[in-house]
Amino acid sequence: MIVRIMGEGQRELADSHFAELNVLDDELLAEMESGDEEGFRRTLTALLAAVRRLGGPLPDDALEPSELILPSPDATLDEVREMLSDDGLIPG
């Protein structure tokens, strides 16, 4: 799956990594619903770090469609809230 982190580029991740990412996504969703800004910031940072660690970067000139778009590291709670579906940032 191709994942884009806004402002950073794209990474390719194996489907097997999504269980780990979904745990962080669920935490992020709970923190957003409770208005826990500190927890939100910590979990967003961890989610993006996991994507960077688990996914291989695509070349800058690659024009692959992103199947998943994640917010930039400096995104606010309100900006991320606008990106959410009922499942969080990561479907499933």
Image: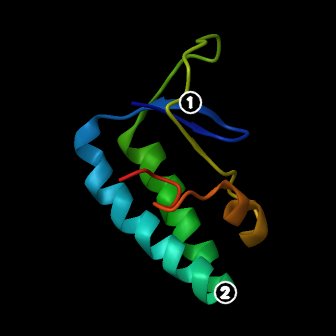
Q: Residue at x 67, y 54 (%)?
A: 83
Labels 1 and 2: the sequence-earlier one: 1
Say which mark, if any, is on residue 81. Answer: none
Whole-number angstrom distance, CA of label 1 to CA of label 2: 29 Å
Above/below status of 32 relative to 46: below
Above/below status of 50 relative to 40: above
Q: Position of residue 76 (x, y in %)?
A: 77, 67
Quarter of the view holding residue 62: top right
Q: Residue at x 46, y 52 (%)?
A: 90
Evaluate if marks 1 and 2 touch, with contact meaning CB atoms under 8 Å apart.
no
Residue hosting label 1: 10
Identify which residue, 80 or 39, lies in the foreground.
Answer: 80
In the rendered view, how is the structure colored? rainbow
Amino acid carrying label 2: it is: Gly
Q: Secondary structure at mark 2?
A: loop
Q: From the viewer's perspective, is 40 left or right of 43? A: right
Amino acid carrying label 1: it is: Gln
Label 1 Cα neighbours within 10 Å, binned few <14 / some 14-19 / many ≥20: many
Q: Position of residue 40 (x, y in %)?
A: 60, 76
Residue hosting label 2: 35
Q: Residue at x 52, y 72 (%)?
A: 29
Above/below status of 37 relative to 60: below
